[in-house]
């Protein structure tokens, strides 16, 4: 198997989890249990399985509970990026944590659940990575392999893998899984404070440096309480 492009992943875990209410009234979304364990443990376990050695986890909402849970782990080793004073959103969160992140680094949402195809997600991204051409490489899944997803999709992809956003009134064939491989070049000249990664992606699209890799496994959207039971049922069948 090819070598991983990075030994470190950032996990976005600071959000308020509004769509997962009422389950997030007393716990952060990453600690909501699905198929017997907290959402963030699904992600951390996968990182450990493939050999990612370090995870940087940002915290804000009910931060003490989340920090206590993840820092018990030794594989991967967890470093906390503290956003207790201000929720910085996805882009600002990466900037806050940048000193802990090598170039490149994996970045994941904390509510990801997926089943790998012939090769795991992280080696899929690593095999496709080209630092000379890419500011970020997004793991994408077609609608047929996106369980619980009911939206119109996120991206179009050209024959070389370069991405463009869904056009208004159209269906886009690919959905962003919440998993990407990121170069520090994407983070250059970033705004101060809180901002979305979409700002950085838009610049990379304009420069032809935002790319996608098509995931060969199954990906589950678990954004609401209603998505938990169908996800657990699907996982029992595989």
Image (spheres, rainbow, N blue to C red):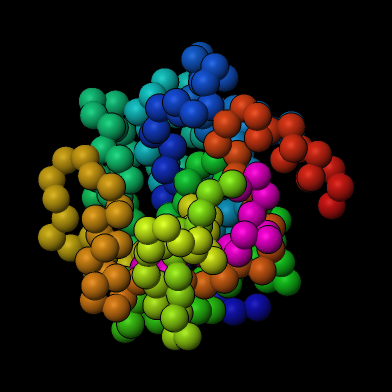
Chain part drawn in magenta: 136-149
| Rendered image quadrant of residue 228 | top right
Taking the spot 18% from the left edge, 63% from the top edge, the residue there is 188
Total residue callouts: 0
> x, y percentage for residue 234?
79, 45
Tell which residue pokes out farthest to the top in this image. Answer: 26
Q: Quadrant of the N terminus?
A: bottom right
> x, y percentage for residue 179?
49, 57
Nearer the observer, 100 or 183: 183
Taking the spot 37% from the left edge, 38% from the top edge, the residue there is 58
- Residue 40 visible in rendering: no
Residue 180 among those drawn in magenta: no
Task: Left or right? Give the position of 66 relative to 92.
Answer: right
Task: Left or right? Give the position of 56 relative to 117.
Answer: left
> x, y percentage for residue 39?
60, 36
> x, y percentage for residue 151?
53, 49
Task: Left or right? Give the position of 156 relative to 48.
Answer: left
Tell which residue pokes out farthest to the front in this image. Answer: 169
| Rendered image quadrant of residue 211 | bottom left
Taking the spot 29% from the left edge, 26% from the top edge, the residue there is 84
- Residue 189 visible in rendering: yes
Residue 137 among those drawn in magenta: yes
In the image, is residue 13 above or below residue 69? Answer: below
| Rendered image quadrant of residue 229 | top right
Taking the spot 78% from the left edge, 45% from the top edge, the residue there is 235
Tell which residue pokes out farthest to the right in this image. Answer: 237
Nearer the observer, 169 or 206: 169
Nearer the observer, 137 or 44: 137
Q: Chief secondary structure of the magenta span?
A: strand
């Amino acid at each position: 198997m090819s070598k991983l492009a990075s030994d470190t992943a950032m996990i976005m875990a600071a959000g308020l989890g509004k769509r997962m209410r009422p389950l997030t009234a007393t716990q952060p979304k990453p600690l909501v249990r699905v198929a017997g364990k907290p959402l963030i443990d699904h992600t951390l376990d996968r990182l450990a399985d493939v050999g990612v050695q370090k995870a940087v986890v940002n915290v804000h909402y009910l931060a003490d509970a989340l920090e206590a849970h993840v820092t018990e782990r030794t594989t991967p080793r967890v470093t906390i990026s503290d956003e207790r004073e201000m929720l910085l959103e996805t882009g600002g969160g990466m900037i806050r944590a940048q000193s802990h992140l090598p170039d490149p680094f994996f970045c994941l949402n904390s509510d990801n659940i997926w089943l790998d195809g012939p090769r795991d997600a992280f080696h899929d991204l690593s095999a496709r990575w080209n630092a000379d051409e890419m500011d970020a490489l997004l793991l994408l899944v077609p609608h047929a392999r996106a369980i619980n997803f009911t939206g119109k999709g996120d991206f179009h992809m050209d024959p070389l893998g370069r991405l463009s956003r869904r056009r208004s009134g159209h269906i886009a064939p690919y959905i962003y899984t919440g998993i990407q491989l990121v170069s520090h070049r994407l983070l250059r000249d970033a705004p101060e404070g809180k901002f979305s990664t979409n700002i950085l992606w838009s610049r990379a699209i304009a420069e032809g440096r935002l790319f996608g890799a098509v995931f060969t496994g199954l990906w589950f959207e678990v954004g609401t309480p209603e998505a938990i039971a169908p996800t657990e049922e699907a996982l029992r069948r595989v």
